[in-house]
């Protein structure tokens, strides 16, 4: 990638994020805020794989955040804190659930797809609300964060920050490679012209399903991180409105752009934090802002950085 | 453009960092729900906290009091983030408030882990009363199970043999049902756990309750669902036929609305509570009249608990003469419950939940014709919650 | 279980069904004809309820409250369409979802500022507030009977409108082939605004019918909106008939689940497990229904557009 | 006689009361250009859709390269070597010309579950793509975004994509539609150059092109195949003249 305006901005952005803990060494609140923003960025980047590249408008993506977080929570409930157990299991469950949900929902398209993904996610939400053993809607307290044989201490805010930062970079890199691979070319083709793709001989369903599972696993990773970060998990994390927020982050940042969802997640969270401090009626500003973004800022924040060169 | 935003953020952050760390004041963070439909509860709490501060001249132990209110948006994650902000950025000495169990559970570690005091003005999840109890955590309300346990006793006393239970299917709802089951000696002949918080139409459940012909119906519906339930109970023609026993459903927030639509069925219905607006204690009288004068309405129990929160904190700060570094001193002072409470004198249990009386309350008209609740008698005396025994403190 | 209870629960299911139909009819038309995913439909439901509550308060009459509330919601709907939604027709669904979600936030907050956070109540006149004996020993709330009557009348009215009138012809044509309407030389903009206004008024009517039962609250729209979407997706987008059938289906299944699922489960599994599972299952039931229908018919039951 | 590449037997498809395809039998030899003509509404598009797999026939069978594909999904037919162009140009408009053809090469190549290596730098895709583009005369437009091509070029690109899948048979739905005379002539030349190497089923309105290219012609009227034969036979067929040639175009 040549250093165009977008490249410069993104590099500076990443350097800023990387150096933030040094600048804010006695401001753990901001480190926490940015940690959360990075975690949701990972989720948003994974959702972008579906929305932006594959034209699959999933309205249930937050479910994988819930799965990841619940994995940590349930293991912690049984006092198993080993991350080498927790994390692979969390990712595996995310993959299995995504495989099942994807297999069912990808039979439909358009709004039917939106609604079926929402419905499937709501089922898990209600499941979470109903299981008393795991706190029902009160959720589970995660008092001990995942342990990695002493290699890294997630209880340490700044160390955790850099772990999240690492996974964010890794996610971006993976999605970058993926979308430019042979596989990615097919998935993007499905967004552009699915009929043509089928006529060429691609069984689009398989490719979409694979993308759906990959996105689910990455989002499950975000869930593992979020559960650890929040020290808590409850079904709210899977509610459809949370999936809606993720969608908004992606669109705000720029559909189908590599870094867009990261910017979207950061702006969304900062805006939420700043506006809600300003007035309890902050949603009367936030609502029209949403509308304005859709109407006047097609392509999201990413489009402000010039024409897309991601292809 | 975005970089500029980030840059500006960093500058602001740096400035904020510079302005912290001066301690001529008591800083209190107050987390409640100010947006969403539940914001009406948060408003009552905020109003009560403000009233309490005015009543003490906004001073505690010679220090000025500074309060920062934060809205949790009814979401655990947001509640935690706001709590983090209060603890880490604003460096408050006390964090109080919390309507919802899940918000409190999510925020708990942020406060206690930082060595600050956490005071719940409402939420009372069993975890915090039992296994997760903490030396720096105090409640000015009750543990979830206690109020329905009192109701179970009421049902026994009133000779109810068969009971139909309707409550929302979430943690607090299940706690309430478990609580009433713990003391009720009759038979529960039917139980419906409804979808929460979205279900507001109870036609199917009411039809089942009617068909079951119980001696009484027990419900728990806080907030707007309570209004909906009471209305439908009357429309279905059940008021007056099957006595209705409720907890946390009929309160000063819902009663004005009931009165407006002349929901006469609610008159004379029974509930249990640790407090009532007509309770004959000096602090309660002062609080209720002050609240009515300032805000023109009856305070809810949420408000009463919050009012107590102010005085609990004040007792701690005064005990150490404003030396906010003296955590041990403040903790010891609070554990004595040595402050004027709306509920009268009480003690703290070892889990720092109040050991207190619970009253049977009835909906009545006051001298001005306004619908309110009145305490009838003590049902449970100096009641210790069930989970205190699990608290290793 | 007695027959009387079964009858009563059937009526309850019916009542929920027609209420959902009032909401879903407008939603499916707007969706089918303008291809607009309008999440803000729930805001119109809320607006109708708030208007009705306010007018009822001013005039002391629920009936006048409804009669004034209907045109008010209609006008609000038309205003929303002309100001915000018109430009969204050409956009993809994602844009529409977000922009209309923004409208929800805006209206919720506006309602909070105007009416306060505690919500409103709608008092009913005495003749509607009680209940009647529909069969020996079976009492049913009068107002719920009214809801059923209103819902069925609207369904009949819509049927006549769609099947027998010129506007109805255009609506049908629009639902099956959008471009055709333009080709007929119709003022499409006008037609769209009109249809949207109609849908808004129906949503408002649903809010007015629900208001006296559940109270009028901020955010009441979103909760039922998802159900309405489930209905139109099951019914097939753009199909009024589908919306009607699906609404009744959802209403009945939801009510029956709440009524009898615990009994059913207790026959299969232990009492304790049944008590935990029944509420969870009944909460999921409509979603299970939708997923099942879409699994076998990915276009819903009555999709107007073939293939 | 050699085995036909495509053999359609007794194909019937109706929509409600309307019979769009009425007992059609057709076969295409491996080296043959077989044209299907007919007036508007004759059911040509429906016919093509059934062969491509977009529509399921009510009755009848479709055999391709010796196997029965009547119930096979579109992508599987494509993988057996049935490539097509659409009546309305169907390309990936937002990527370059070369990317379009590379995707077709990839479809033929069959290794699409590769997640890591960058597809754009894969010589196994790019080299064949350029070769095909050269063959159709678009090699000078490789790096242009496909949506920005002229109409005629887009049709050429679509044909290039079909060729790049290494097909045994091309299914061409009005490839000359909307083209100027010069563009048509170039397309005819291009198709002629393919003739003999691949079976072609050609649906076309441009009669000059049809008679220039086709080995055999089938005339479809109201869903029925009323005649099949060599161009001169069709030209002289009274029934065809009456039903079609005299009236249309």
Image: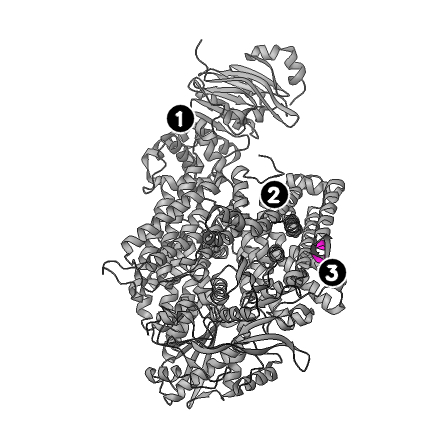
Residue situated in front as seen by the camera: A119 or A166 = A119
Query: According to the image, label 3 marks what residue?
Result: C128
Query: According to the image, label 2 marks what residue?
Result: C235
- Quadrant (top left/top right/bottom left/bottom right) for the C terminus of chain D: top right
Q: Residue at x 66, y 45 (%)?
A: C244
C44 to D194, vertically: above or below: below
Q: Is residue A279 left or right of residue C152?
A: left
Residue situated in front as seen by the camera: C80 or B370 = B370
Q: Secondary structure at mark 2?
A: helix
* Magenta stretch, residue numbers: C142-146
Extreme residue toward the top, this view: D1
Question: How far apart, in angstroms, are the residues tagged by discs 3 and 2?
Answer: 32 Å
Q: Residue D76: image x %, image y %?
A: 44, 28
Q: Residue at x 47, y 66 (%)?
A: B182
Residue A311 visible in image: no
Q: Residue A52: image x %, image y %?
A: 45, 48
Q: Chain of mark 2?
A: C
Question: How far apart, in angstroms, are the residues tagged by discs 3 and 1?
Answer: 75 Å
B313 to A255, vertically: above or below: below
Q: Secondary structure at mark 3?
A: helix
Query: According to the image, label 1 marks what residue?
Result: D166
Q: Residue C81: image x %, image y %?
A: 65, 55
Residue situated in front as seen by the camera: C108 or A94 = A94
- Give yes or no for contact between labels 3 and 1 (Cβ–Cβ under 8 Å): no
- Quadrant (top left/top right/bottom left/bottom right) for the N terminus of chain D: top left
Is residue C191 inside the magenta stretch?
no
């Amino acid at each position: 990638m040549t250093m165009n305006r977008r490249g410069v901005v993104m590099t500076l952005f990443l350097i800023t994020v990387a150096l933030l803990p040094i600048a804010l060494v006695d401001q753990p609140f901001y480190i926490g805020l940015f940690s959360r923003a990075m975690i949701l960025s990972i989720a948003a980047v994974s959702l972008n794989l579906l929305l932006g590249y594959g034209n699959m408008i999933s309205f249930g993506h937050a479910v994988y955040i819930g799965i990841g977080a619940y994995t940590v929570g349930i293991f912690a409930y049984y006092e198993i804190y080993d991350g080498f157990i927790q994390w692979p299991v969390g990712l595996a469950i995310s993959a299995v659930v995504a495989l099942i949900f994807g297999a069912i929902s990808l039979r439909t398209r358009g709004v039917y797809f939106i609604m079926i993904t929402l419905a499937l996610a709501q089922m898990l939400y209600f499941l979470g609300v109903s299981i008393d053993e795991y706190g029902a809607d009160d959720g589970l307290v995660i008092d001990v964060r995942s342990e990695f044989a002493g290699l890294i201490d997630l209880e340490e805010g700044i160390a955790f920050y850099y772990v999240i930062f690492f996974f964010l970079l890794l996610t971006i890199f993976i999605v970058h490679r993926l979308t430019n691979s042979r596989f990615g070319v097919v998935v993007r083709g499905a967004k552009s012209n699915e009929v043509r793709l089928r006529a060429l001989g691609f069984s689009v369903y398989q490719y979409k399903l694979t993308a759906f599972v990959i996105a689910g696993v990455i989002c499950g990773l975000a869930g593992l991180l979020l559960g650890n970060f929040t020290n808590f998990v409850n079904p709210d994390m899977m509610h459809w409105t949370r999936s809606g927020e993720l969608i908004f982050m992606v669109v705000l940042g720029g559909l189908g752009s590599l870094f867009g969802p990261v910017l979207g997640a950061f702006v969304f969270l900062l805006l939420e934090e700043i506006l809600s401090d300003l007035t309890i009626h902050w949603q009367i500003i936030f609502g029209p802002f949403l509308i304005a973004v859709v109407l006047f800022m097609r392509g999201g924040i990413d489009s402000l950085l010039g024409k897309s060169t991601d292809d | 453009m975005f970089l500029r935003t980030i840059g500006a953020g960093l500058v602001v952050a740096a400035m904020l960092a510079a302005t912290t760390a001066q301690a001529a004041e008591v800083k209190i963070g107050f987390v409640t729900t100010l947006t969403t439909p539940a914001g009406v509860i948060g408003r009552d709490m905020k109003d009560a906290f403000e009233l309490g501060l005015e009543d003490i001249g906004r001073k505690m132990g010679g220090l000025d009091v500074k309060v920062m209110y934060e809205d949790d948006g009814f979401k655990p994650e947001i509640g935690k983030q706001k709590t983090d902000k209060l603890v880490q950025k604003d460096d408050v000495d006390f964090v109080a408030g919390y309507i919802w169990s899940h918000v409190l559970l999510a925020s708990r570690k942020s406060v206690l882990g930082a060595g600050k005091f956490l005071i719940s003005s409402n939420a009372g999840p069993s975890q915090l009363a039992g296994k997760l109890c903490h030396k720096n955590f105090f409640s000015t309300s009750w543990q979830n199970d206690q109020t329905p346990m009192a109701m179970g006793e009421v049902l026994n006393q009133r000779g109810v043999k068969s009971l139909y239970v309707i409550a929302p299917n979430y943690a607090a709802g299940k706690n309430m049902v478990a609580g009433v089951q713990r003391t009720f000696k009759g038979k529960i002949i039917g139980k419906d756990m409804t979808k929460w918080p979205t279900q507001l139409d109870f036609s199917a459940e009411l039809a089942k309750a009617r068909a079951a012909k119980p001696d009484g119906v027990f419900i728990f519906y806080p907030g707007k669902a309570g209004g909906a339930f009471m209305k439908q109970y009357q429309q279905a023609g059940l008021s007056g036929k099957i006595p209705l026993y409720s907890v946390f459903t009929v309160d000063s927030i819902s009663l004005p609305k009931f009165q407006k639509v002349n929901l006469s069925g609610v008159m004379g219905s029974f509930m249990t509570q640790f407090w009532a607006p007509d309770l004959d204690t000096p602090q309660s009288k002062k609080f209720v009249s002050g609240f009515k004068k300032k805000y023109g309405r009856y305070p809810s129990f949420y408000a009463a608990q919050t009012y107590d929160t102010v005085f609990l904190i004040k007792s701690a700060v005064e005990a150490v003469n404003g030396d906010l570094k003296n955590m041990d001193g403040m903790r010891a002072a609070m554990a004595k419950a040595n402050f004027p409470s709306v509920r009268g004198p009480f003690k703290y249990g070892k889990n720092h939940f109040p050991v207190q009386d619970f009253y049977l309350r009835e909906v009545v008209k006051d001298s001005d014709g306004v619908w309110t609740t009145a305490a009838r008698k003590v049902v449970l005396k100096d009641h210790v919650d069930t989970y205190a025994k699990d608290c290793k403190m | 279980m007695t027959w009387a209870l079964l009858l009563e629960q059937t009526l309850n299911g019916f009542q929920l069904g027609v209420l959902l139909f009032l909401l879903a009819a407008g939603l499916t038309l707007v969706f089918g004809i303008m291809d607009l995913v309008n999440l803000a439909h729930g805001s119109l439901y809320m607006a109708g309820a708030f208007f009705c509550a306010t007018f009822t308060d001013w005039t002391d009459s629920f009936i006048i409250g409804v009669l004034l509330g209907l045109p008010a919601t209609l006008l609000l709907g038309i205003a929303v369409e002309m100001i915000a939604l018109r430009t969204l027709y050409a956009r993809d669904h994602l844009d529409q979802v977000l922009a209309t979600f923004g409208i929800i936030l805006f209206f919720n907050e506006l309602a909070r500022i105007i009416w306060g956070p505690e919500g409103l109540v709608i008092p009913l006149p005495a003749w509607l507030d009680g209940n009647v004996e529909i069969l020996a020993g079976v009492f049913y709330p009068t107002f719920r009977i009214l809801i059923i009557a209103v819902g069925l009348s609207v369904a009949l009215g819509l049927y006549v409108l769609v099947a027998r009138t010129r506007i109805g012809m255009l609506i049908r044509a629009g639902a099956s082939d959008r471009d055709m309407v333009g080709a007929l030389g119709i003022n499409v903009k006008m037609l769209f605004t009109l249809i949207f206004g109609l849908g808004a008024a129906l949503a408002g009517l649903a809010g007015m019918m629900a208001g006296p039962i559940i109270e009028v609250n901020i955010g009441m729209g979103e909760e039922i909106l998802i159900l309405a979407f489930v209905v139109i997706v099951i019914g097939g987008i753009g199909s009024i008939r589908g919306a009607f059938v699906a609404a009744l289906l959802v209403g009945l299944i939801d009510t029956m689940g709440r009524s009898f699922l615990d009994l059913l489960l207790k026959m299969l599994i232990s009492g304790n497990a049944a008590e935990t599972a029944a509420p969870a299952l009944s909460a999921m039931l409509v979603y299970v229904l939708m997923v099942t229908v879409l699994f076998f018919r990915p276009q819903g039951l009555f999709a107007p557009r073939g293939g | 006689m050699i085995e036909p590449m495509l053999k359609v037997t007794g194909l019937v498809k109706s929509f409600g009361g309307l019979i769009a395809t009425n007992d059609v039998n057709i076969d295409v030899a491996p080296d043959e250009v077989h044209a299907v003509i007919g007036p508007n509404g004759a059911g040509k598009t429906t016919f093509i859709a059934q062969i491509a797999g977009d529509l399921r026939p009510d009755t009848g069978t479709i055999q391709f390269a010796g196997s029965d594909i009547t119930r096979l999904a579109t992508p599987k037919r494509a993988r057996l070597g049935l490539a097509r162009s659409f009546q309305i140009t169907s390309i990936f408009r937002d990527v370059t010309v070369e990317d379009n053809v590379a995707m077709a090469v990839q479809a033929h190549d069959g290794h699409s579950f590769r997640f890591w290596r960058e597809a754009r730098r894969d010589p196994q895709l790019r080299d064949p793509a350029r070769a095909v583009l050269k063959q159709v005369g678009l090699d000078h437009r490789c790096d242009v975004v496909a949506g920005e091509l002229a109409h005629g070029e887009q049709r050429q690109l679509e044909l290039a994509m079909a060729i790049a899948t290494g097909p045994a048979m091309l299914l061409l739905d009005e490839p000359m539609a909307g083209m100027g005379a010069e563009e048509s002539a170039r397309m005819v030349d291009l198709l002629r150059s393919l003739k003999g190497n691949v079976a072609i089923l050609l649906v076309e309105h441009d009669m000059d092109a049809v008679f220039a290219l086709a080995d055999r012609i089938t005339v479809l009227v109201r869903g029925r195949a009323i005649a099949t034969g060599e161009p001169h036979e069709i030209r002289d067929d009274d029934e065809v003249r009456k039903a079609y040639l005299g009236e249309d175009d």
